[in-house]
């Protein structure tokens, strides 16, 4: 089955983040702190911190070893702020399999927060966890605006190994919304 992609622009990312923030504010459910899951949830968490006007902390969880290949979910950088007795808003960019959110909630509960509520920008219906708040449901592979180098590099390496020409690769990348400047940057600095 061919992978279907969902390229997300910075403008759309910002709008979706505002949408989640407005929903949270409309429910008048105050939170004391945001805990963003790095790497993907850091940008979203930063925006929510601004929109909701609450402080932010982070944890890092790594799991993907390659496109669509999830390895063991492990916390590689722990919480550095106290959350005991606090109402925590746990954020990530995507609820894909749900494993990352499950691991993060379990980890945070070790620190005795009052509540842990989840929010993501995207929710995939096959996820084992449905976030309390999310902006959009999709089954596509999401290409975030903060992962340009990662995806131009990954697609180029994969397609080169498949015998695709530089022009075919360029056309594919442009169809995904990557511009000439972004593609040239990755080629110049990472694909020598």
Image (cartoon, helix red, strand yellow):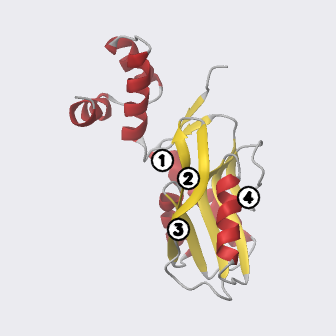
Find the distance from the CA under tag 4 to the CA under tag 2. 18 Å
Question: If the image is split into quadrants, where does the N terminus sit?
Answer: top right
The residue wearing badge 3 is 59
Residue 22 visible within the image: no
Q: Does label 2 or label 3 sit earlier along the sequence?
A: 2
Q: Position of residue 152 (x, y in %)?
A: 39, 32
Q: Pointer 1 and pointer 2: residues touching (CB < 8 Å)? A: yes
| Left or right relative to 68: residue 76 | left
Q: Give the residue at x 55% y 52%.
A: 15
Tell which circle, 1 or 4, labels the residue nearer the N-terminal end: 1
The residue pinned by badge 2 equals 15
Crowding near pointer 2: few (<14 within 10 Å), some, many (20+)? few
> Which mark sits nearer the N-terminus, 1 or 3?
1
Q: Nearer the viewer, residue 105 or 40?
A: 105
Instruction: Check contact, mark 3 vs mark 4: CB within 8 A.
Output: no
Helix, strand or loop at mark 1: helix
Q: Which mark is residue 11?
A: 1
**In this rendering, is residue 65 above or below 107?**
above
Q: CA distance from mark 2 to mark 3?
A: 25 Å
- Where is residue 105, by image quadrant? bottom right
């Amino acid at each position: 089955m061919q992978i279907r992609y969902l390229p997300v622009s910075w403008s759309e990312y910002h709008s979706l983040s505002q949408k989640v923030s407005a929903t949270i504010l409309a429910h008048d459910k105050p939170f004391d702190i945001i805990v963003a899951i790095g790497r993907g949830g850091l940008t979203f968490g930063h925006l929510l911190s601004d929109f909701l006007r609450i402080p932010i902390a982070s944890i890092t969880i790594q799991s993907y070893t390659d496109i669509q290949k999830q390895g063991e979910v492990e916390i590689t950088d722990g919480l550095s702020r106290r959350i005991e007795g606090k109402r925590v808003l746990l954020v990530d960019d995507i609820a894909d399999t749900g494993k990352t959110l499950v691991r993060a909630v379990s980890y945070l509960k070790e620190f005795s927060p009052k509540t842990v509520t989840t929010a993501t920008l995207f929710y995939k219906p096959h996820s084992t966890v449905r976030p309390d708040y999310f902006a959009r449901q999709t089954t596509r592979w999401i290409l975030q605006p903060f992962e340009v180098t990662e995806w131009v590099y990954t697609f180029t390496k994969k397609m080169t190994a498949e015998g695709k020409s530089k022009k075919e690769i360029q056309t594919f990348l442009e169809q995904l919304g990557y511009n000439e400047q972004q593609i040239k940057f990755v080629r110049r600095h990472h694909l020598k």
